[in-house]
Amino acid sequence: MAFGNAGAPNSFGSIPNVHAFYANGLVAGEPNSIPAITFDGAKVSEAGDPVTPVFYASVKPENPVSDTRMYVLNGASADRDGTFILHGHLWQRDPYVCNENDAVLGAGLPGKCNAPATGSLFFPAGTPLVGSRRIGDNPIGFAQGGQESWNAPSHFDIVLPSAGGGNGVTGDYLFRDKASFGNAGGVWGILRVE
């Protein structure tokens, strides 16, 4: 499909119902509509779900999980980078915290990593150290709603403090490559919050 002006033949702008681009209703009743899928009696997908990843998260009170995690990577992207977004959600850019012994290494702020790059008083010279070895709530981290530089050598830990956004709203949330090329190429999916 070509890029172009709204209404130009054979362009994205010529799609009459582009506002419903990801809506299951567009394929309802179609002969190739996807049926509901179950495995060992458990629901895997709803009838009419798109042929794309649908991940499930729960906000039910009986599920005491405190966060939802998505691990984002790109197995091959020789031509361009992407930008991962998950509609309706924010997450920390660096959700990493230090080990319990980091107070000994001189971290002045709980959770802040202050380990040397190599060697220290407690480790032999040349011992490679990293600033963090755990995922958690980074007290000096900042929140974001999109992750740029999504390419083949990168990977990202998306830790959602609450599935369904800050208010835990149930429903389907679109995740995708914000850039048009990846989006049109099928780089999208659904996080279903129940």
Image: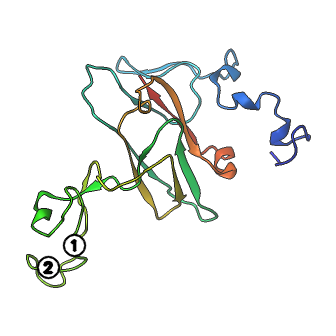
Residue 174 lies left or right of residue 115; in this view the side is right
Q: Earlier in the sequence, mark 1 or mark 2?
A: 2
Which residue type carries mark 1?
Leu
- How far from the left and from the top, in percent, is residue 32? 67, 23
**Label 1 Cα crowd, 10 Å radius (few <14 / some 14-19 / many 20+):** some
Q: CA distance from mark 1 to mark 2?
A: 9 Å
Q: Are marks 1 and 2 in contact (CB under 8 Å)?
A: yes
Instruction: Pick whichever, 25 or 76, lies toward us.
Output: 25
How many dots with numbers? 2
Note whether 171 is above or below 81 in the view shown.
above
Which residue type carries mark 2?
Ser
Instruction: Pick whichever, 189 or 166, lies toward us.
Output: 166
- How far from the left and from the top, in percent, is residue 157? 38, 51
Residue identified by numbered label 1: 129
- How far from the left and from the top, in percent, is residue 2? 83, 48
Residue 76 lies left or right of residue 38; in this view the side is right
Note whether 102 is above or below 72 in the view shown.
below
